[in-house]
Amino acid sequence: MPTLTATSLLDPSVHARRWIADYCTKGRAGDVLCDASDSAAWAAMLEEIVTVGGDDLEGARERVQHHAEDIGTGFRIAGESEERPWPLSPVPLLIKGDEWAQIAAGIVQRADLLEHVVADLYGEAKLVEKGLIPAALVTGSPHFLRPMVGLEPTGDHHLYFVAFDLGRGPTGEWRVLADHLRAPAGAGYALENRLAISRAVGGLQTRLNIERHAPFFAAFRDGLAAACRRTEPRIGLLTPGRYSISYAEQAHLARYLGFLFVEGADLAALEDKLYVRTIGGLKRIDALWHRIDPRLLDPLAFDAHSQIGVPGLIDVMAAGNTLVANAPGVGVPESAAFAAFLPRICARETGRDLLLPNIATWWCGQDRARATVIEDFGNLLIGPAFGVQPQGMDGLRPLPGAEITGQARARLLADMALRPQDYVGQEIVRLSTMPVVTEAGLVPRPFTLRVFAARGADGQWTVMPGGFARIGAEPDVRATVMGEGTWSADVAIHGSDPVDAVSLLPPADTVHIRRNPGTLPSRVADNFFWLGRYLERGEALLNIIRVMLGNSIDADAGGALGVETIRRLVALVVNGGAASKPASLKRADLIQFARTALESEDTHSVRAINRSARGIGKGSRDRLAADFVRLLDAPYPTRGGMLDRTGSLQRRYAALAGLSAEHMGRTAAWRFHDLGRRIERALTMARAVPAFGMTGTGVDDLSTLLDLADSQISYRQRYLTGIARVPVVDLVALDPGNPRSLAYQIERIVEHLGALPVLGDDGMAEDQQAQANALLAAVLTASAAQLSEPALKKIEQQLYALSDAIARRYFLQGAEPLRAAGMTLA
């Protein structure tokens, strides 16, 4: 171990050598660092970490994790509603270019073989006829979809994007642990890992000549486009929704690739073509990259209970009008049982062995294989054959046979005798280890590698240079113990030749300028509209609570409000459903009333409004800035008194309003967001003016009305003689120059509706535009002195009707848009 001096402490190479020497005392045979022939690369990587963060591995991990969170990387455990931060190690897995070339060749061979298998299973079924695949292995699979038999996929391929889990053995050999064909996940995480590592350790890319991910994603995008029938196709990424375990990754991929991020409800099949429901009508979808269970893709063809699919999608596929990647039904070879037959299929169909072998597998659906499993039960891994829990097991996770004892073993063997086809036996895989940062410094942990391949424009496979590693929490190197892993790591393919700085974007001087941001799905418009309404509604409720608790800035009122004014404030809160009527108007009861309106889980409280806004934000992360999402996702304040908490929340609302006003592009999405804000603010004023601004109201009421409209300063600048009813009503209701007034909101509503697309070309106003124009005319011709409570009640009703008209026209719910007159199909 090197001797450290005052001078050497400044030398990154000294720290790197010290870390490696210390690590290798903990390592074992097969560790990628201790046994690697490219130890110089590992030393260079650790030196870069030292250069950026000094001799502090824990700090390096925190820094990388911070960058991952900034990017928005997250995941969800099945059954949980909240996302967890994506756990990223600062130490990437290094693989030399020549070793990677061998892995990539094996991946391409395997992808081609699986394409051949799937095409045969849904075509001539020669492999079953030749005896290479047992018929029961196909028909018994829950992933075999009979409606796909004989259907020729668009683009002549079933597979366009695949993933494989690899394990490295103690002697350095790589083997395939699992195939992922239905809806492979993780490519976005690989991309995000690389982005986070590049930001944290910027010099690593150039120093080690690390291969970039951008060419892979560009090839995939070009491959889908080339398989479409139109020269400028519209491509969508179909997500199950924001409760998907990898929703954050899907949103990031859609944004990075320039795909429309859609849910099943956004799409409609009509006359054997697929459309996305947009604010401008139905727009053609030429290709769909889906991330949902294929059995849920089309309730008319597969699972009739599916709520997230697209009725008629398979008819669209059969007509050849939309490419669906990957095609439904490709999951048959994913099953663990299939691994027992793939080596023989490869040898017989291609004349070559698998370059990346499987782990040894025995399917118990065959007598000889079942006898082998029973005989060697204690030395094998016992698991489900088709990814479905058998009767004799308590879960889906394979277990070492030696750990299945007593009644559990008897139950499993009894069920295996009844339904042997439900089980497989596999060899227990032992994995290599790699460095990961813990509180104890660098320690060895087992890892698996997920690798991705995609078809390019020429129809050939392109392999992502790297992927991502999953690292186990325990030092036990058995793959079954590692499970899904605790950390992830970037995988860097390095070599001696410089790597071009390739980006997914074309050269700047070749980009066609475009100021239209593209298609806006109706669901997204709906979400942005209601996000604006919820944020404005929460801010208005906070204003009422703040004023009610005596935080008026009106000095003339002496800091305390009259009983009648408090009663009217309470009525606003009660009518809004935020809290039930308090027992009295005493201070203690009012504080409890305010606490309910702020924090109750069972009412339309500020907390509940925040929760609704937060949910919309999580479902719109592909279109919202990261800062906006973080503010929506910030913890609800719990410290301090009631006024402190209302103040904290108001500042958050103000920050969100500032981001939307100054940072959101003036797109149709922003218009819907602002429309929601304007309608909600107009409703607030339409309710507040009758309560506090009618004939007979006092100074407390009028001051409260100015507070609720945030117009105290504006009023005092204009009127120096004190508060009078008619000027107050004019300012907060009818003055189009006051950005908080009722008239101002309606003017903005008319402006937004005039800028949004219409279906007809006759120049006539649509229903929502006509209603808004009529509402504006009524407000602009009104007089503050004569404005009555019935007139304001009518305005409130008109605002609700206008909101409904906007929803009917733009949000296109249910089957109505398919029958709408004038609907454009593009």
Image: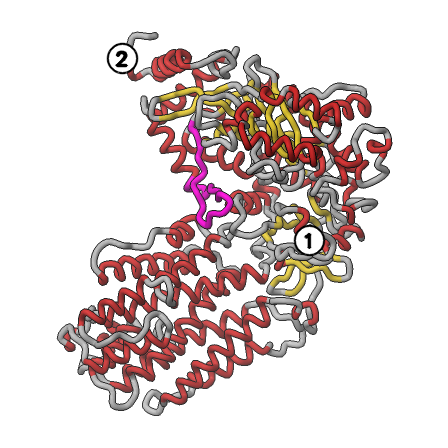
The residue tagged 2 is 7
The residue tagged 1 is 303
Q: Residues within 10 Å of mark 2 (few under 14, many from 20)?
A: few
Q: Residue at x 58, y 72 (%)?
A: 808
What span is in magenta?
Answer: 69-90
Counting from the top left corner in percent of width and height, residue 528 is at: 49, 61
Residue 143 lies in the magenta-colored region: no
Question: Image quarter for residue 182?
Answer: top right
Label 2 – label 1 distance at C-alpha: 69 Å
- 792 and 581: which one is in front? 581
The residue most toward the bottom is 786
Counting from the top left corner in percent of width and height, residue 196 is at: 45, 34
Indicate the amino acid at tag 2: Thr
Indicate the amino acid at tag 1: Asp
Question: Image quarter for residue 507?
Answer: top right
Residue 75 lies in the magenta-colored region: yes
Q: Residues within 10 Å of mark 1 (few under 14, many from 20)?
A: some
**249 is higher (above) or lower (below) than 583:** above
Q: Residue at x 59, y 31 (%)?
A: 410
Residue 278 in the figure: left or right of residue 198: right
